[in-house]
């Protein structure tokens, strides 16, 4: 056989393996979602509406979803894309999310270090402290834009 033909067959086999693997993964995720969907579950639809499931009609593939007290939507069962964990579950899943002075910053977290603006003296209280993008911030993290009366 020609080596080029063997390479093409190998690439085709790898593609088929990945397609089968991906379809099994999607099927497993769909089964997990179906098992999680039950009356009283807090869910999100594929168009971004959050609500609590009041009832499920399996024969007609419909769900009654209460978005706010008194507002009930009838949606197709397949529009529910995920079950949102409640606050109790979220607190149990995450450890303590408080920021300590000694903890490492998480990825993408901004660190505000006190530094002074270039050209200002260390006794200038209006510009010393935290600076973000060249704008000095007060102790509450709000930009300070007022000038000193002597300037």
Image: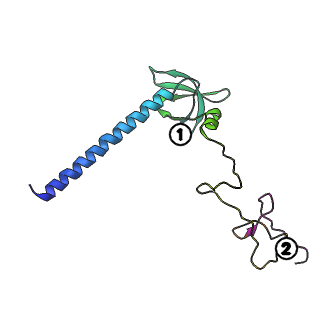
Where does the magenta region start and end?
135-150
**Residue visible at 80% across and 57% down in the picture:** 140
Q: Secondary structure at mark 2?
A: loop
Residue 67 is covered by the magenta coloring: no
Q: Is residue 119 left or right of residue 65?
A: right
Residue bearing mark 1: 47
Q: Residue furthest left?
A: 1
| Number of marks present in the image shown | 2
Percent x, y for residue 42?
59, 31
Reading the chain from its start, which is encountered first: label 1 or label 2? 1
Nearer to us: label 1 or label 2? 2
Q: Quadrant of the C terminus?
A: bottom right
Percent x, y for residue 135?
74, 68
Residue bearing mark 2: 124
Residue 140 is covered by the magenta coloring: yes
Q: Is residue 124 above or below residue 32?
A: below
**Residue visible at 70% across and 52% down in the picture:** 100
* Marker disc for residue 66: none
Q: Quadrant of the N terminus?
A: bottom left
Percent x, y for residue 16?
26, 44
* Dominant secondary structure, magenta: loop
Find residue 96 and report its image quarter: top right
Q: Residues within 10 Å of mark 1 (few under 14, many from 20)?
A: few
Find residue 125 and report its image quarter: bottom right
């Amino acid at each position: 056989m020609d080596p080029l033909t063997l390479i093409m067959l190998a690439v085709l086999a790898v593609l088929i393996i990945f397609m089968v693997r991906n379809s099994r993964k999607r099927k497993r995720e769909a089964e997990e979602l179906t098992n999680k969907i039950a009356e009283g579950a807090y869910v999100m639809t594929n168009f971004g509406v959050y609500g609590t499931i009041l009832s499920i009609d399996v024969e007609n593939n419909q769900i009654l979803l209460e978005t706010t007290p008194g507002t009930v939507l009838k949606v197709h069962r397949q529009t529910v894309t995920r079950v949102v964990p409640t606050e109790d579950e979220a607190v149990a899943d995450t450890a303590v999310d408080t920021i300590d002075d000694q903890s490492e910053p998480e990825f993408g977290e901004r660190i505000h270090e006190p530094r002074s603006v270039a050209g200002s003296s260390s006794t200038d209280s209006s510009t010393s402290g935290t600076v973000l993008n060249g704008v000095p911030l007060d102790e509450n993290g709000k930009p300070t834009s007022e000038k000193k009366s002597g300037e």
